[in-house]
Image: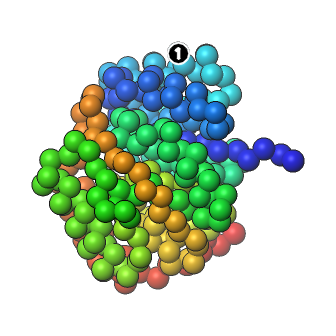
């Protein structure tokens, strides 16, 4: 029986403090995952660190280098397309800064093996599981997901979660040309597509820990895009990609 192929897509911009540590953790798991780094021209040398590690990990570690910051959503879409072209069965989104625990990757994969097409590493499906965030940010994030759940009528507690594993069949059904949001609204848009297309969505409780090293990439523009984008999504017709 052919082994199930799984790849973790990690977008980076100025993550030199974290990138080697996170790659060694993911690639050192007992459960086999490959990694694809999408680097948006990091001036701090992030890509150089990945290139050095590629000599160590061979066909388990890959990288796409892009010119300049092009947005989280476009990075993941580039990763999804690459993964589909290279025959992967499951594709996981993950941050480079250890806010997502690599040891939770097998739990997301197990949820997919149990029938999920989208397994969400959820901060809010079992109360609030966030460490080291200011209380204001926790409240904003929690109620943002509640806002999404209400407007889109989608029963997902952590709609903005960035730690997600997708099945190949789900990604093949989504028309990436119709995914418009580039910031964290992208995460909402992807989940809404999965929901409207009738795929099985499962939330796996995780503990989210805010980054300890490096600089956050959040901005007020990201929140604005997500707020208005959700309203537009509510009235958009979602159809499967034509093959």
**Colour approach in the figure:** rainbow
Which residue position is annotated with label 1? 52
Residue 19 in view of the camera: yes
Residue 172 in view of the camera: no
* Figure quadrant of the C terminus: bottom right
Q: Give the image location of residue 112, x and y in percent.
A: 62, 58
Q: Residue at x 15, y 47 (%)?
A: 134
Q: Give the image location of residue 92, x and y in percent.
A: 54, 48
Q: Residue at x 59, y 32 (%)?
A: 29
Q: Give the image location of residue 10, x and y in percent.
A: 47, 39
View extreme (right): residue: 1
Q: Is residue 214 above or below residue 95?
A: above
View extreme (front): residue: 126
Q: Residue at x 58, y 21 (%)?
A: 54
Q: Is residue 159 above or below residue 103?
A: below
Q: Secondary structure at mark 1?
A: helix
Residue 209 or residue 152, whichever sits in front = 209
Q: Give the image location of residue 103, x and y in percent.
A: 50, 39
Q: Residue at x 25, y 55 (%)?
A: 222
Q: Is residue 153 above or below residue 6?
A: below
Q: Is residue 167 above or below residue 67?
A: below
Neighbour tally class for label 1: few under 14, some 14-19, many 20 plus, Cα within 10 Å: few
Residue 134 or residue 183, whichever sits in front = 134
Residue 105 appears left or right of 168: left
How many labels, in total? 1
């Amino acid at each position: 029986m052919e082994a199930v192929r799984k790849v973790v897509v990690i977008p980076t911009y100025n993550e030199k403090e974290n990138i080697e540590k996170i790659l060694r953790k993911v690639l050192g798991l007992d459960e086999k995952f490959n990694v694809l780094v999408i680097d948006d021209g990091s001036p701090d040398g992030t890509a150089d660190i990945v290139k050095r590690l590629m000599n160590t990990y061979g066909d388990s570690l890959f990288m796409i280098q892009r010119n300049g910051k092009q947005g989280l959503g476009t990075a993941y879409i580039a990763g999804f397309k690459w993964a589909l072209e290279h025959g992967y069965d499951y594709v996981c989104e993950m941050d480079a800064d250890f806010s997502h625990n690599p040891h939770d990757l097998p739990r997301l994969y197990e949820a997919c093996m149990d029938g999920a097409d989208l397994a969400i590493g959820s901060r809010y499906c079992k109360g609030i599981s966030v460490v080291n965030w200011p209380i204001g940010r926790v409240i904003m994030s929690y109620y943002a997901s509640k806002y999404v759940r209400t407007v889109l009528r989608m029963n997902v507690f952590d709609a903005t979660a960035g730690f997600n594993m997708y099945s190949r069949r789900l990604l093949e059904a989504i028309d990436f040309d119709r995914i418009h949001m580039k910031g964290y609204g992208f995460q909402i848009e992807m989940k809404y597509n999965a929901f409207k297309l009738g795929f099985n969505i499962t939330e796996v409780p995780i503990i989210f820990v805010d980054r300890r090293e490096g600089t956050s990439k959040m901005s007020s523009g990201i929140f604005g895009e997500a707020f208005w984008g959700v309203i537009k999504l509510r009235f958009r017709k979602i159809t499967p990609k034509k093959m």
